[in-house]
Amino acid sequence: MSQTVGLTRLAYSRAWHHISASTPHPTLSTIKAPPEAVTPPSLGRMASRIAMILMGKHKPIWDPSTDCGDYVVVTDCAALYTTGLKKWRKTYYRHNTRPGSLQAITMDVLMEKHGGAEVLRKAVSGMLPKNRLRDKRLARLKAFEGPAHPYKLNLVRFGGTVVGETNWEGAVQAIREADMARI
């Protein structure tokens, strides 16, 4: 945050983050021993990371009563990775408070019916605080079944490369070296 007294607009500006549910991720992977065994992020680890970004806990201005989170675009939700037998044993329940109206659906049936985006949305919704800001935060989650999405121009870039793609660290390093040469 800047040195000015009070809140600044730049501190509360929202950035766009991209997460792919199918590409291997070194920090969100459940297997980390050999580098070739790195898996895509599991549903729970990815959902908790998304919930942190939606709440804004990664920012220095985070406040529980302020909605200062960012947007998150998740692609390839059709290939969600779950460990163990959760895909067939995890059950989602619904009840409309009438006697005998309890309905249960397993994760694999929910994925066939509504897609992996709905499973991810339910996981993230369960990790957000249960307050008035929950629906607003969840509305900033944009989940897509395939790799295509309409928010490509909104994603954070360094040197024309989207953060998180291959060689984006190289673009950041090139910008830093250019700045050091200029100074």
Image (cartoon, helix red, strand yellow):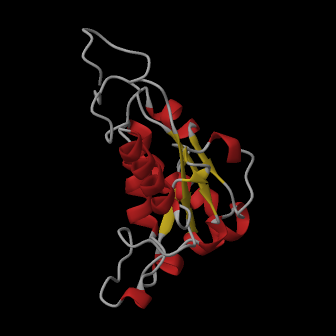
The answer to whether residue 126 shows anywhere in this view is: no
Q: Point out the image quarter for the C terminus.
A: top left
Using residue 38 as the reference point, say whether residue 61 is left or right of it.
Answer: left
- Of 134 and 32, the residue lying toward us: 32
Q: Point out the image quarter for the N terminus.
A: top left
Using residue 140 as the reference point, say whether residue 89 is left or right of it.
Answer: left
Quadrant of residue 80 within the rendered picture: bottom right
Residue extending furthest toward the top: 5
Name the residue located 50 percent from the left edge and 31 percent from the top edge.
Answer: 14
Is 25 above or below relative to 67? below
Q: Position of residue 88 (x, y in %)?
A: 53, 80
- Of 63 and 159, the residue lying toward us: 159
Is 67 above or below relative to 104? above
**Number of on-image labels:** 0
Is 30 above or below relative to 149? below
Name the residue located 24 percent from the left edge and 16 percent from the top edge.
Answer: 3
Q: Position of residue 63 (x, y in %)?
A: 28, 27
Is 72 above or below relative to 1? below
The answer to whether residue 133 shows anywhere in this view is: yes
Quadrant of residue 115 within the rendered picture: bottom right
- Of 179 and 27, the residue lying toward us: 179
Quadrant of residue 74 within the rendered picture: bottom right
Name the residue located 45 percent from the left edge and 60 percent from the top edge.
Answer: 169
- Of 149 and 79, the residue lying toward us: 149
Q: Position of residue 81 (x, y in %)?
A: 51, 75
